[in-house]
Amino acid sequence: LSSHPAVAAAVVAPGRDARGDTRLVGYAVPRPGHSFDPAALRAHLKSLVPAYMVPAVLVELDALPLSSNGKVDRRALPEPDPAERGGTPYVPPRTPGEEALAGIWQDVLGREGVGAEDDFFDLGGSSVQLLQVTSRVRAAFGVTLTVRDFYDAPTVAGLTAAVEEQVLRELEAAMRQ
């Protein structure tokens, strides 16, 4: 996070989402003359680290809180809004499949208003929650998503397309028998 040219100082710390689950929160102080752009910071981070290491929420600070010995006082970092979307604009689900998958994500992630273009990892999804989603998708659609599917298409729309593709393949295979 600190390697981005618009960031003067930064720290990443664990935080809590609306359900009380742990998620990564990035705190950044912009350099003078630079604006705070969560989408640009997130894109920068995604080019450097795996998706699970990108903070679910990025918070702008005027300065990092410091302890008396000059180190970052992590206990003084502000709690982010538990409903923070991670800077992604809301796009409502457009198909019944997207609605069903968004509903599964809402239940598993404890979030309201999951949209078609929301990224599982940007919403704070963890590996444990990923497994919960795959289990619910298997029960609802009869198909198995892989971890790779989440990394290849981490949005509701992308995973819905992967689910629908698997359903079609299985139907075609059944029709050939």
Image (cartoon, rainbow, N blue to C red):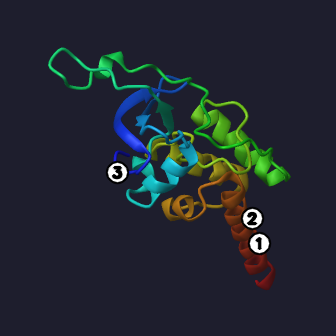
Note whether 41 is above or below 10 in the view shown.
Answer: below
Note whether 57 is above or below 42 in the view shown.
Answer: above
Foreground disc of the pair 3, 1? 3
Q: Which residue is mark 3?
A: 3
Foreground disc of the pair 2, 3? 3
Q: Which residue is mark 2?
A: 164
The kind of secondary structure element at disc 1 is: helix
Q: Quadrant of residue 50?
A: bottom left
Q: Which mark is residue 168?
A: 1
Can residue 142 be seen by looking at this rendering?
Answer: no
Q: Position of residue 87 (x, y in %)?
A: 61, 40
Residue type of the residue flagged with mark 3: Ser
Q: Nearer the viewer, residue 173 or 120?
A: 120
Mark 1 nearby-residue class (10 Å; few <14, some 14–19, many ≥20): few
Mark 3 nearby-residue class (10 Å; few <14, some 14–19, many ≥20): few
Q: Alpha carbon of mark 1 to alpha carbon of mark 2: how far?
A: 6 Å
| Residue depicted at 48% across the width and 31% down the height | 60
Q: Which mark is residue 121?
A: none
The kind of secondary structure element at disc 3 is: loop
